[in-house]
Image (cartoon, rainbow, N blue to C red):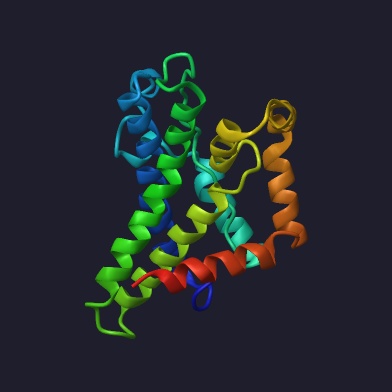
Amino acid sequence: MIGNINLEYIAVLIVSILLSLTVHEFMHAYAGYVLGDHTAKADGRLSLNPLSHIDPLMTVALPIATLLLFGAPILAAKPVPFDPRNVRYDEFGAAILAAAGPLSNLVLAFLAALLARAVTPGTFWAYALELFVTLNVALFIFNMLPIPPLDGSRVLYAFAPESLQRLMIQLEPYGLLIVFGLVLAGGLGGFLTTLNNYVLNLLP
């Protein structure tokens, strides 16, 4: 991550997390709505209000704790509900719904990177934008991992053979534990860092 871990860093990180995850979850809800499923709207999730999407433990306390303990934040928002029976295009519709969240983070990173070019280097805003870009690229990469229940698994599911689909369904209840275990054990660290740097280098 960028810079030293201090109160300024944590404050900028919290604001960046709230904004990034709010847009991420809103886009899941919006994609579901456009595809014919109103479940998220009925649950109050078709909203840009961060309070509709954050979980005090998983979205705020967990990233701060893991940042201080491991030097990198691990976090999650409340999952956006959807009914696959209502989504048009069946599994492919569900894949579009899933991809909408991570792709919104990639768009946010791109826009922030463009804005950063107009900001004086070394200033607070340059620092804040750099952190925002890095966070959103990380959210894009992490959420697109094809491990249930991450968004990338929904995309993979739409194109996977039936045998792999059955395996993914069996793994889903334990998926987050597997992901967190791999991250904390360092099993994904180098891979994710390489992907993050690759995407960061493609941004303006």
* Direction from residue 48 to residue 178 in the image, left or right: right
Which one is in front, 133 or 75? 133
Which one is in front, 163 or 178? 163
Which one is in front, 88 or 113? 88
Q: Which residue is drawn at 33% across and 23% down?
A: 41
Q: Measured from the top left, where is residue 144 in percent x and y?
A: 54, 48
- Disc count in the image? 0
Quadrant, the C terminus: bottom left
* Direction from residue 54 to residue 118 in the image, left or right: left
Q: Is residue 6 above or below residue 95?
A: below
Q: Residue at x 47, y 36 (%)?
A: 98
Location of residue 164 by image quarter:
top right
Location of residue 176 by image quarter:
top right
* Direction from residue 87 to residue 168 in the image, left or right: right
Q: Measured from the top left, where is residue 11 in percent x and y?
A: 41, 63
Q: Measured from the top left, where is residue 78 in percent x and y?
A: 49, 35
Q: Measured from the top left, where is residue 7 in percent x and y?
A: 46, 69
Q: Residue furthest left?
A: 118
Quadrant, the N terminus: bottom right
Q: Residue at x 32, y 30 (%)?
A: 46
Location of residue 68 by image quarter:
bottom right
Q: Residue furthest top?
A: 85
Q: Residue at x 35, y 18 (%)?
A: 42
* Direction from residue 188 to residue 92 in the image, left or right: left
